[in-house]
């Protein structure tokens, strides 16, 4: 680490979020601020009402879709790898592999490099570029699934389980709960890659984000509204909907639906039972324990800071592997996705 400059001189936690004093901006602030860098479009990280927002073009599009085009007074798009100067601070956005447009914020100042991961995962996702590790003095990581018990299976195996169930129960509809931004489109793309070329029926709440993904080059194949036709028309079909819709009256339009839910939390049986989920699909847009620890091991930062999730276990692992670590305990970030 640089003797004269402490990391907290460049980035420090405040009630609004992670603050960069030399550049006078916040990263993923949880309340309105004058200048914000936004890592991705989930509503716990991307809020409306800021003065100026810097983000990838895709994230700005997502925010415009969700909050209206006036979500901030000024917007600046930065492509992956583009260097943006904020006073004496350089900011570069690099892929985080979380959802469309998601980025890590690489912040450089006076020879010090700090990387704010936002939310991330390491495995391939057909709807967004893969996470790119960046050498740094301080790596600021999430730890949503930061316990050794969380080891996510291959998402293709989970999709294969879904398709086996569809084949086994041709008289039933399969109703898959998936978060509207990221998870729904990923499940659709994975189904296409697995050979499901029939129309996939979708809840209306997903239409605008599905269209936005298509606009950005993610081919989702034939989609149909899940509102037309008779109940029997949906036998043997796959329907994708926000998780909340799978548990309300809307779901009664389908024949004896198999309730499925795509989430990293479906590894926890009690959570699956709580949701009345017949077919839990462990598909997560966050890094699991092995991905978190492998990332710290690969980057070997001078320090690890942990923003949210299961901070203690990951901090302890890092210390045991020679990487000083601390929990920032930033408030306002949810555990996974959003409805």
Image (spheres, grey):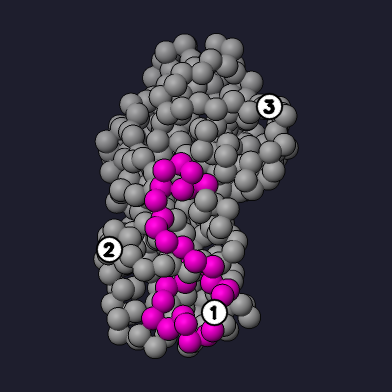
The structure residue drawn at horizontal position 51% and vertical position 54%, both measured from the top left corner, is 210
Front residue of 60 and 203: 203
Query: Dot 1: what SS?
Result: loop
Q: Position of residue 239 (x, y in %)?
A: 47, 71
Which secondary structure, mark 3?
Answer: strand
Q: Secondary structure at mark 2?
A: loop
Residue at x 58% of width, y 74% of height: 227
The answer to which quarter of the image holds residue 26 is top right
Check disc 3 and report the residue beneath it: 74
Q: Which residue is under mark 1?
A: 229
> Which mark sits nearer the N-terminus, 2 or 3?
3
Residue 194's label in the rendered image is: 2
Decide which of tag 3 and tag 1 comes sooner along the chain.
3
Looking at the rendering, in which quadrant would you find the C terminus?
bottom right
Which residue is more in the foreground, 189 or 313?
189
For the residue carrying disc 1, how many other residues have a C-alpha within 10 Å: few (<14), some (14-19), or many (20+)? few
Give the vertical position of 71 relative to 316 (above or below): above
Q: Is residue 296 visible?
A: yes
Q: Nearer the viewer, mark 3 or mark 1?
A: 1
Which of the two labelled residues, at mark 1 and mark 2, occupies the earlier sequence position? 2
The CA span between labels 1 and 2 is 26 Å
Q: Residues within 10 Å of mark 2 (few under 14, many from 20)?
A: some
| Residue 336 in picture, x, y percent from top left | 50, 56
Give the residues in magenta. Answer: 212-241
Where residue 114 sits, quadrant-wise, is top left
């Amino acid at each position: 680490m640089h003797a004269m400059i402490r990391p907290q001189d460049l980035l420090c936690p405040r009630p609004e979020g992670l603050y960069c004093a030399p550049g006078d901006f916040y990263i993923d602030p949880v309340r309105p601020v004058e200048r914000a860098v936004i890592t991705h479009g989930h509503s716990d990280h991307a809020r409306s009402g800021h003065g100026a927002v810097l983000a990838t073009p895709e994230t700005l599009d997502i925010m415009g879709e969700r909050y209206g085009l006036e979500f901030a007074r000024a917007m600046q798009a930065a492509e992956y790898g583009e260097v943006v100067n904020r006073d004496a601070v350089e900011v570069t956005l690099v892929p985080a592999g979380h959802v469309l447009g998601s980025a890590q914020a690489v912040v450089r100042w006076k020879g010090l490099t700090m990387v704010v991961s936002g939310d991330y995962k390491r495995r391939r996702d057909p709807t967004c570029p893969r996470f790119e590790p960046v050498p740094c003095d301080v790596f600021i990581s999430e730890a949503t699934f930061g316990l050794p018990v969380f080891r996510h299976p291959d998402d293709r195996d989970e999709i294969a389980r879904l398709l086996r169930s569809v084949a086994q129960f041709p008289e039933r509809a399969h109703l898959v709960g998936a978060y509207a931004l990221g998870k729904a489109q990923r499940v659709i793309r994975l189904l296409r890659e697995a050979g499901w070329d029939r129309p996939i029926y979708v809840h209306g709440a997903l239409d605008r984000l599905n269209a936005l993904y298509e606009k950005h080059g993610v081919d989702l194949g034939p989609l149909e509204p899940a509102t037309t036709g008779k109940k029997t028309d949906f036998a043997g079909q796959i329907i994708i909907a926000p998780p909340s819709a799978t548990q309300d009256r809307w779901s009664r339009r389908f024949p004896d639906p198999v309730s499925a839910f795509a989430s990293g939390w479906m590894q926890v049986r009690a959570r699956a039972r709580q949701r009345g989920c017949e077919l839990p699909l462990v598909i997560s847009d966050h890094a699991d324990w092995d991905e978190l620890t492998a990332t710290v091991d690969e980057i070997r930062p001078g320090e690890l800071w942990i923003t949210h999730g299961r901070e203690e276990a990951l901090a302890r692992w890092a210390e045991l592997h020679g990487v000083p670590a601390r929990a920032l305990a930033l408030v306002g970030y949810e555990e996974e996705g959003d409805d």
